[in-house]
Image: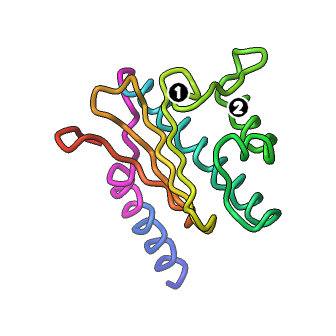
Amino acid sequence: MIRHRISLGTVTLFLFIGALTPYFAQNVPTASEQPDLARRQLAVSFLRSINTAEVADFSNFGSFAEWQTLLAHQPDFLNKCLAMNYPHEATPRFADMPEILPGWSLRLNVHTDGKGYDVLFQDLTDKCWYAALTDERGVIRQSKAIDCQI
């Protein structure tokens, strides 16, 4: 009798989980969304690298750093991100600000006391002005122009 209850409970549980599976299934991006997704992943990855480099610089020098100083002090974090996102290039390099990568504009402002920074990394190819933002708290946000869907 107990064996039948356990079997019935197990079957009921699997049927319930099977009914919920489509509810939790992920939507696979379409082919037209793939380039946007790849560019957004680049932006988020790059800002993570900046946050990591800034924390390392703050730990070593007691203040956050401007872009050129950050490149000089923490090249490993930044170049590793660059190599991961541009694997087809033999020696990828950052250009001068503001367009440090093809189609990407960087604005990195360090507070006058060196205890904070604000970063805006904008996709210059996106007609809706996609940008990823972060600051000394390490939270990464994404945005687009007001009439565009994120």
Q: Which residue is mark 2?
A: 84
Residue ID at (49%, 69%): 10
CB atoms of marks 2 and 1 within 8 Å = no
Mark sitting earlier along the chain (2/1): 2
Classify mark 2: residues with Cα within 10 Å, few (<14), some (14-19) or many (20+).
Answer: few
Residue ID at (50%, 71%): 7
Q: Position of residue 62 (x, y in %)?
A: 75, 68
Most extreme residue toward the bottom, as rendered? 2
Tell which of 122 and 87 is nearer to you.
122
Identified by mark 1, the residue type is Glu
Most extreme residue toward the left, as rendered? 147
Q: Secondary structure at mark 1?
A: loop
| Vertical comparison of 110 with 107: above or below | below
Q: Quadrant of residue 36?
A: top left
Identified by mark 2, the residue type is Met
Q: Secondary structure at mark 2?
A: helix
Question: What residue range appears in magenta?
Answer: 15-32
Classify mark 1: residues with Cα within 10 Å, few (<14), some (14-19) or many (20+).
Answer: some
Tell which of 138 and 41 is nearer to you.
138
Residue ID at (48%, 40%): 121
Residue ID at (67%, 27%): 94
Disc 2 and disc 1: Cα gap in Å? Answer: 19 Å
Tell which of 38 and 80 is nearer to you.
80
| Vertical comparison of 97 with 67: above or below | above
| Vertical comparison of 52 with 36: above or below | below
Q: Which residue is mark 1?
A: 99
Q: Position of residue 20 (x, y in %)?
A: 35, 58
Q: Does the magenta segment cover residue 16? A: yes
Q: Does the magenta segment cover residue 55? A: no
